[in-house]
Structure formats: C-alpha cells, structure tokens
Amino acid sequence: METEIQLLCCSAHDIRSLAKASVDLIVTSPPYPMIVMWDEVFSNQDERIRAHLAAGEGHDAFDLMHKLLDKTWAECDRVLKPGGIVCINIGDATRTIDGDFQLYSNHSRILRAFLDREYAALPDILWRKQTNAPNKFMGSGMLPVGAYVTYEHEYVLVLRKARRRQFRNESEKTLRRQSAFFWEERNIWFSDVWYDIKGTPQNLVNKSARDRSAAFPFELAYRLISMFSIKKDVVLDPFVGTGTTLAAALTAGRSAVGVEVDRSLVGVAWDLLASVPEFANHYTRARLIRHMQFAAERTQEGKPLKYINRHYQFPVMTLQETELLISDVVEFMPAGTDTLRVEHADVPQADMVGVWDRPPSQTRSVEKRCKKIDLQMPLRKTGVEQCQLELDIQKKEE
Ligand SMILES: C[S@@+](CC[C@H](N)C(=O)[O-])C[C@H]1O[C@@H](n2cnc3c(N)ncnc32)[C@H](O)[C@@H]1O
C-alpha cells in the first residue's frame, strides 16, 4: 500500500494547490487567540490586532484573530469531502486586559464558525491537562467573589461536513475493516474525557521548537486519525507546526498534507519525518503487544475473547476486529521537493503472528525497546534528508 506525505510552506489562508473535496479528515490545532504566545503571530497577519491589544481592547483583538482563523476554516471547508470530519484541538484563553480578567471562549467561537457552515457538531472530547503549578489558582485567594476557576482542559471539537460517510466499493470496505481499532482501545478513545494523554514534552523534536509551536502529543493526533479515517485516506493539518499530525498519519498508514507558515518549523517537521518510519514500526508493535497482553489477561481470568484475528491469529473481542491489520512502513522516498512517498507492507509483521500466548517476557522486551526509541536518532541517509536538501536549495534560489 502506498501513501504520500506532503509539507507545504505557505499560509493556510490560501491552499489553492489542494483540490476541492480532496481531503477526508482534518486534524489540527491553530494558534490560540488571546494566548499571549500567539499575539505576535496574529499581529503580524493583521496589524490592527497589535493596536487593539495595546489599547486594552481585548474583545476587538479576539474578534480579529478569529476572523483570520475563519479564512483557514473556509479553505478547510473547500478541500474537505462531504462526510469528512474536522477535529480541532483548541484551548480557551483566560487573560487580564486593561485590569479586567476574563475568559475568551475560543472553542465556542470556532464551533460557531462551523455551525454557520452547516456542519454537524459531534460529541467533543475534553483533553484534561492537569497542572501541578503551586500558583495555579488565580484571583482573590480564599476570599469571595474574585477568585477564578483554573482551566486544566482543552477541547477537541469534532465536526462533520454534511451527512455521514458511506463506504460503497469493495476496496474501501476492505480498508475500513483493516483500519478497525481494538475493543479495549475503543473504550478509552471514545470516552469524552482523555486523562491519559499528557501535555508534557516528549521526545519528538527539540524542546525549543516544541515550545515555540506548542506541539500536541503524537498520541493525540494518532488517536484522532485512527478514530476518524481509514487507511489511505488523506489527512490535512493546516497549522502543522513541528509536523506531529504528519508523523501520526504516516504511522497510521494515511496520506497527509501539512501546511505551515513559519519556514523554520517546516525544517523541524522534515527532521521529525526522517525519524518516523523506524519509530512507527516500534509504536505499532507496542500497540499489538498491548492487545496481546489484554487477551492473555482476559483468558487467565476465565473470560476468553470470542473471535480470532485472521492476520495475527490472536483473539479479539468482536467480529469487527478480525481483519484489523496494522502493518509496517517498509520504504519511504522523496517524490518532488515537498512530498514523501511511503510504502506500507500489505502483510502482518512476521514476528507478531501467532505469538500472543507466549510468555510475556518475550513480548515485553519489544515494548521496552519501543519506549527507549529516540525519535531524534539520526537514520542512515534517508529520503527525507534528500527532501530537506532540495528544500534548502529551493530556499537559496528564492
Ligand atoms: C498550535 S501550533 C500547531 C502545533 C502542531 N500541532 C504541532 O504538533 O507542532 C499552530 C501553528 O500554526 C502556524 N500558523 C499560524 N498562522 C498560520 C497560517 N496563517 N498558515 C499556516 N500556519 C500558520 C504557527 O506557526 C504554528 O506552528
């Protein structure tokens, strides 16, 4: 199976190189209006925002910031297929402007923008990001009425364009069955509050780039992609930052397009992609092993799983999981200056077939290896490095 990963360095206000109705899923996290770290990014795109902030006119600044995001939502709407899903990770902002503390509700403003386009709102996800900071409570301390509730969550808005997607032809139906997730994953992924994804830094890219882009965790993107698309689908992230969504799409066997206006982050994203294929294969094995451990535990408890997955020969809970196949990335190579072509195996990993009932120590070692893997580890001369090289040459020529 072949997929493509494309990384465009331009503003998401205008992505005319992407055709109308060419994308199956959008997973993104925009710059957050009224969060100080994004003031400059917004003000550089509309000078009036800087003036409003300086004059203490918070609501006017908030309004203009969202008008900028609306331009990207219009492009998203143009390129998304009917039945396609949009997942937007967004946090609300709390801020004191001109001595007045207020909440700026980004999630409700973005939800409104999509409802105005007649999207269907689906149940959203609260991503719980607990902070242990000693000064996390704001306002008048132990005295009413000027103390404020601390925000420790972000939203993942889930929206659908038009009616539910239909899978009509046989090849799509097969890919959909292969893209199934495990029953025990479903029980966590489709819960409305995600406690288990930490917002803390991870190994993906260097810390300064991560801080500058406020990267979201790999697991967040991987989960959303697995929940709302099938293999070979096209995933778009119009605010791709360090490229987390592209890494997750590559791992999940989806094609993807990322758009980023900051050229220095585009370089960071290419570096990340160079490390992903090896990481992807370990990550996938860890997922399979977790399932094998689940199956072994249930069996030991006298509650064996009823069905057998035909690729891996391990037991699964439901008939829908019997064709699930999470295969390896076998090759990736540049295809032009901004695209990677990725080849995925069509067969299961040989070392994962028929091993579910072996002693856990044998499988645990693979999980350990997976945890240890360093995504910044330089690989041999890769296709991505070649892409990066070509991008650098292009930059020099401009
Ligand atoms: C919250 S960050 C996204 C982080 C990303 N999810 C990651 O994991 O690295 C938002 C990104 O949008 C980019 N951005 C802001 N305005 C943009 C625009 N008009 N077009 C494209 N990218 C933009 C910023 O440079 C930033 O990298």
Image: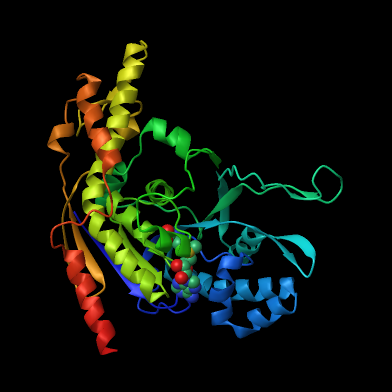
Using residue 61 as the reference point, say whether residue 210 is left or right of it: left
Q: In which quarter of the image is residue 322?
A: top left
Across and down, in percent, residue 167 comes to 35, 51
Across and down, in percent, residue 88 comes to 51, 58
Q: In which quarter of the image is residue 22?
A: bottom left
Of residues 5 and 180, the one drawn nearer to the viewer in this rendering: 5
- In the displayed orientation, state which residue is furthest to the right: 144
Name the residue at 64% across, 57% down: 92
Across and down, in percent, residue 358 comes to 19, 20
Q: Quadrant of the N terminus?
A: bottom left
Q: Can residue 90 be seen in this view?
A: yes
Name the residue at 19% across, 25% down: 362
Position of residue 199 relative to residue 387, above or below, is above
Using residue 257 as the reference point, say whether residue 393 is left or right of it: left
Of residues 199 and 252, the one drawn nearer to the viewer in this rendering: 199
Using residue 320 as the reference point, say whether residue 355 is left or right of it: left
Q: Quadrant of residue 299?
A: top left
Position of residue 216 relative to residue 196, above or below, is below
Name the residue at 49% across, 48% down: 199
Across and down, in percent, residue 136 comes to 66, 47
